[in-house]
Image (cartoon, helix red, strand yellow):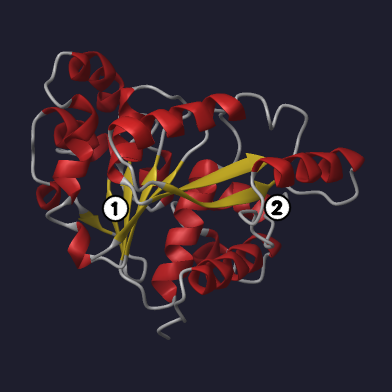
Amino acid sequence: MGKVIAIANQKGGVGKTTSAVNLTAALGAKGFKMLLVDIDPQGNSTSGLGVNKRGLKLCSYDLLTADTPAEQIIVHTPFENVDVLPSNIDLAGAEIELVEMEGRALRMKNALVKVKQRYDFVMIDCPPSLGIIPLNAFAACDTLLIPIQCEYYALEGLSQLMSTLRQVKRLYNPNIEIEGVLLTMYDSRLNLTVQVVEELKKYFPQKIYRTVIPRNVRLSEAPSYGQPVMYYDRASKGCMAYEELAIEFLKKNNLRPKK
């Protein structure tokens, strides 16, 4: 049965969607069956995998609010072993609708039960908030992967994320753990980067990936072509970084590439 991993940080602009798309694609290319669940109303993971979010008949909004089966919403992508459960702006109204619903925090968990056994990993790209929608992801996942940008405000709000996590552990998901902490937009020449890393080691001992994601133009360009970076420019530093991350991720999960 597939391991479910939520990729989350309530701070925007930390490389969360970039990491969701590119780690998913890198693992897919290594032979693992992957599902990326997009629960951000911006739908950037959806378009980043080449799916036209404006042309969708069904999306994650229908999964969360209308009990539409996940298998009716999932879209196959042209990328090896990668499917997406897409999102679009319709999801923006779901927070308000979910407030009135019974078992509102467990709707995603219940919806994914039927499909996760088809995949090796299910990645959930969360919106940059700590509302009911990401709460659904935390309740549904086995682990949480946290991308953090190496900058002054990186640690701001981190204690709030950890507090939410403890609450989820107590109320909805006693088994949730931290998968890992990923440093993004990394520049080793800056003293600030070193300071942020040292501070993070206090928060997350043993959880920080050795692989870091550098600032890279190709990583920024790839989404506008609807492609993960490994399909856009395989020789780029961004592609190499996510390749390394995929290998490190598999090693931490006691797995080897299948191909």
Query: Residue 10 placed where, x, y %?
Result: 51, 28
Q: Which mark is residue 216?
A: 2
Comparing 150 with 166, the one in front is 166
* 2 or 1: tag closer to the N-terminus: 1
Q: Which amino acid type is marked by label 2?
A: Asn
Q: Can residue 103 be seen in this snapshot?
A: yes
Query: Residue 32 placed where, x, y %?
Result: 35, 73
- Which residue does the image show at 46% across and 51% down from the upper left? 20
Residue 131, by quadrant, is top left
Q: Which amino acid type is marked by label 1?
A: Val
> How many marks do you count on the picture?
2
Comparing 130 with 219, the one in front is 130
Q: CA distance from mark 2 to mark 1?
A: 25 Å
Q: Which mark is residue 84?
A: 1
User: Against 172, is 249 above or below?
Assistant: below
Proximity of marks 2 and 1: CB atoms separated by less than 8 Å = no
Query: Residue 140 placed where, x, y %?
Result: 28, 43
User: Against 125, is 113 above or below?
Assistant: below
Quarter in which the C terminus is drawn: bottom left
Q: Can residue 40 be seen in this snapshot?
A: no
Query: Residue 68 placed where, x, y %?
Result: 8, 39
- Which residue does the image show at 64% across and 68% down from the upper left? 240
Q: Which mark is residue 136?
A: none
User: Against 134, is 187 above or below?
Assistant: below
Q: Is residue 203 left or right of residue 190?
A: left
Comparing 67 with 29, the one in front is 67
- Which residue does the image show at 70% across and 63% down from the upper left? 237
